[in-house]
Amino acid sequence: MRNEIKKGVLLFSISILAFTSLLAQADIIQKEKAVSGIGFSAGQDAFFPPKNEDRNFTFGIGIGVGGAWVNNKFNPFSWPLKALHFYPKKLFIKGESSEFHYFQTSLKAYTPDNILADTVVKNDRPYSSIWYFSFGKKSISKDQKIMVQSDFRIGILGVHMAREAQTWFHQKEREAKERDEPYDPLGWHNQISNGGELTGAYRLTVGFDPIKNINPNFFQITPKIEMSLGYQTYLGTSAALRIGILNSPWWSFHSNPMEYGNTYIKRKDKWFEVYGFLNVSARYVFYDALLQGQFKSSRHTLSESDIRPLQAWVESGLVFRLGAFDTWAALNITTPSNRVVKRDHYWLSLTGHFYF
């Protein structure tokens, strides 16, 4: 009997050691590849027919590439990114950390409700657009409970590409549906910084994992705080919830890759994911060049008193990942950004990522 008890204790001890070893392996963060993946994103109110109103945020398209190449010394943008990231990382992460990087370029366009008017629509938001290049760096603490993300971007306000892209899309939609709408936008020459103006911004995001040891393969909740200085200056906070079959770390996910970039983590032994997510965020906005303009003279801008400083954003979607590819669809809802018009805005964003 004693021998059987000893054998049982021995087997139990071996099982515990093996299980602990597996957990330790799961916590190991793999080394970042030189080029880790590529992603494509698009956002449109036309993707969500019940609220296809063609106003406010009218469309966005983006391409992202991840990998250690962003941090290469021969990339001139790696130097300001390193400098901007150094002290925030030192403040929030003590000791060793793992680093991941991404590049994102996106074109975003915003219009008033009346796009048939070729004059300034004074009782609405101005036309505005931005084409930016974003370089990002994420630091993950050794215990994977804290994430610090820096995003350094340069961009151009008032680009003509926005007018051309929206006009092309409307023409294709008219041809496909054989009708007179949607009309071509006629007021893009009134956009903020029309013809182009250089701009830039730095954004810091800090995320926490309060439930790391509570079944992270099924349920994750991630609170974050963030601040942005530049063409959009604000303080913000958010909370993201993921529920489903989860095989990617909490710090690799963001509900809006077009805006925040993507962290490309490929796990050969964990190649399948399917989950739903909900992200709720709030910002206190101090300045927004896409509404107020910048240094260049513009035909139509809003004053500081026209801006609604407190703004909210809700994103809800589904993600499916199989092997080296994932795809997702997300419904976005935002509260009014200004006091000139009181309307919420809805659009659908679609994303696809390929992992190398």
Image: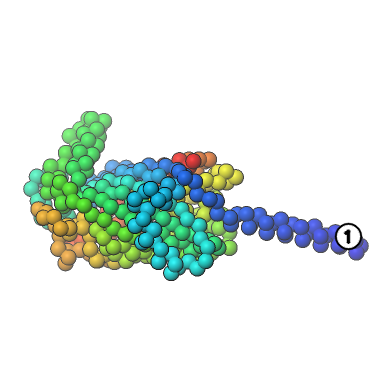
Q: Is residue 139 left or right of residue 227?
A: right
Query: How many marks are shown on the rendered structure?
Result: 1
- Measured as percent of width and height from the top left, residue 310 is found at 27, 66
Q: Is residue 215 left or right of residue 312?
A: right
Q: Where does the N terminus fall, quadrant-wise? A: bottom right
- Measured as percent of width and height from the top left, residue 353 is found at 43, 42
Res 336 visible: no
- Measured as percent of width and height from the top left, residue 214 is found at 57, 62
Which colour style is shown?
Answer: rainbow
Q: Specify the farthest residue to the front.
A: 74
Nearer-the-camera pick, 190 or 214: 190
Q: Is residue 116 left or right of residue 132?
A: left
Nearer-the-camera pick, 38 or 167: 38
State which quadrant residue 336 falls in. bottom left
Crowdedness of circle 1 by 10 Å Cα count: few (<14), some, many (20+)? few
- Mark 1: amino acid: Glu
* Vertical relation: 96 (above or below) 126: below
Q: Specify the farthest residue to the left.
A: 119
Determine the residue positioned at 26% across, 56% down. Answer: 200
Determine the residue positioned at 28% across, 42% down. Answer: 46
Res 144 visible: yes
Q: Which residue position is annotated with label 1?
A: 4
Which secondary structure, mark 1? helix
Determine the residue positioned at 57% across, 43% down. Answer: 268
Determine the residue positioned at 42% across, 47% down. Answer: 69
- Measured as percent of width and height from the top left, residue 188 is found at 15, 45
Q: Is residue 15 left or right of residue 157?
A: right
